[in-house]
């Protein structure tokens, strides 16, 4: 599973972006891969439906998690047997910060290069409909 983060600082409608790539084999929180037709499962293994922020197609899964957890990196960088938990939110107050985590699972590797080719587009839209951030083709 791959994770990339973006941090958005809200200040009178302004947003800044910091990108860091994190590559790891750790399966995050309640997201796990299964061989069954149902892609997503909760911690107990029970299938859960896809959502607006959690989709799969042709064996590839992608999820977006928005968290206020400033310590998300410490939570992520734990022993493989530890499943991190991130609080989730959909809102931020002026001056507040949110961390947008992306997770991609079951990525196919090019046998010739040993590499993957996954990118993502991000749009953070203000309540008035204007873009706070819009970035395309970010490495996932």
Image: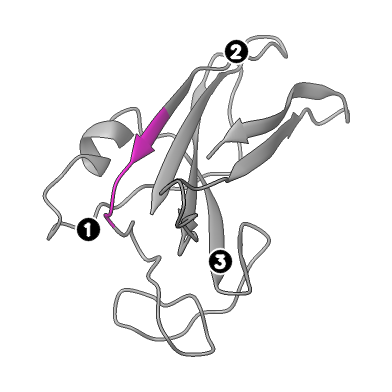
At a point 12% along the width and 60% down the height, the residue shown is: 81
At a point 52% along the width and 20% down the height, the residue shown is: 96
Where, quadrant-wise, is the N terminus in this rendering? bottom left
- Residue 61's place in the image compared with 36, above or below, is above
CA–CA distance in space, label 3 to label 1: 21 Å
Quarter holding residue 31: bottom left
Residue indicated by mark 1: 83
Q: Which residues are magenta?
A: 21-26
CA–CA distance in space, label 2 to label 3: 30 Å
At a point 63% along the width and 74% down the height, the residue shown is: 58
Instruction: Report the front residue among 56 and 115.
Output: 115
Does 35 appear in magenta?
A: no
Residue indicated by mark 2: 16
Instruction: Report the front residue among 47 and 69.
Output: 47
Quarter holding residue 68: top left
- Residue 93's place in the image compared with 91, above or below, is above
């Amino acid at each position: 599973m791959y994770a990339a983060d973006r941090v958005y600082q809200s200040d009178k409608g302004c947003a800044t972006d910091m990108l860091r790539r994190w590559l790891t084999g750790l399966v995050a929180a309640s997201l796990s891969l299964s061989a069954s037709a149902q892609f997503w499962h909760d911690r107990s293994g029970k299938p859960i439906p896809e959502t607006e922020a959690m989709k799969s197609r042709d064996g590839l899964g992608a999820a977006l998690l928005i968290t206020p957890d400033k310590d998300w990196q410490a939570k992520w960088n734990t022993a493989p047997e530890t499943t991190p938990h991130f609080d989730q939110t959909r809102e931020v107050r002026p001056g507040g910060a949110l961390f947008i985590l992306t997770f991609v699972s079951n990525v196919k590797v090019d046998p010739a290069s040993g590499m993957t080719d996954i990118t993502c587009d991000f749009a953070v839209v203000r309540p008035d409909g204007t873009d706070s951030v819009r970035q395309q083709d970010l490495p996932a």
